[in-house]
Image (cartoon, rainbow, N blue to C red):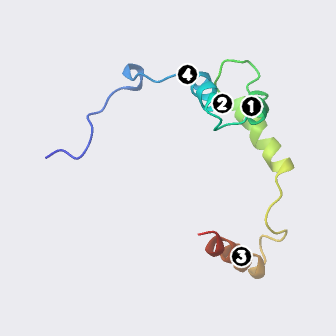
Amino acid sequence: MTYYKEYTPIKQKNIKASSEIRDRLMALGIIPSDLASFFDKFDEDGNGKISLYEGEKFFSWVEKNIKYRYDDENSKEGFQRLRAGWITQE
């Protein structure tokens, strides 16, 4: 009995372009067009892929614009609040 799939090199797999998938998800209403447009801004060369440079720019944007749950990551209280947040979200 085999519990794994036989390996197929990625070049031989039939993988749709990410822009194709994105367009379908937008058509189904799963991804709002304004959200898709926001992420499109990070694909500077418009090839439908995120290069290392583009990924670094996105990560930098996240660091500047997404606030952490608490200010002092070294405080014991901060860790306890974070754990409490995990527990209440499950």
Distance (Cα) linking label 2 and label 4: 14 Å
Type of amino acid under label 1: Ser
Question: Where residue 53 appears, x then y in whole percent?
Answer: 73, 30
Distance (Cα) linking label 1 and label 2: 6 Å
Does label 4 or label 1 sit earlier along the sequence? Answer: 4
Q: Is residue 56 above or below residue 15?
A: below
Mark 3 burial class by Cα count in 10 Å: few <14, some 14-19, many 20+:
some
Tags 2 and 4 in contact by the CB under 8 Å rule?
A: no
For this view, does 19 lie left or right of residue 67?
Answer: left
**Which of the two discs, 3 and 2, sits closer to the camera?**
2
Rendered residue at 83%/71% (across/down): 72
Quickly name the residue at label 4.
Answer: 17
Rendered residue at 66%/30% (across/down): 26
Does label 1 or label 2 sit earlier along the sequence? Answer: 2
Residue 26, label in figure: 2
Q: Nearer the viewer, residue 16 or 32?
A: 32
**Which of the two discs, 2 and 4, sits closer to the camera?**
2
Distance (Cα) linking label 3 and label 2: 38 Å
**Which of the two discs, 3 and 1, sits closer to the camera?**
1
Tags 3 and 1 in contact by the CB under 8 Å rule?
A: no
Q: Nearer the viewer, residue 4 or 20?
A: 20
Type of amino acid under label 2: Met
Type of amino acid under label 3: Phe
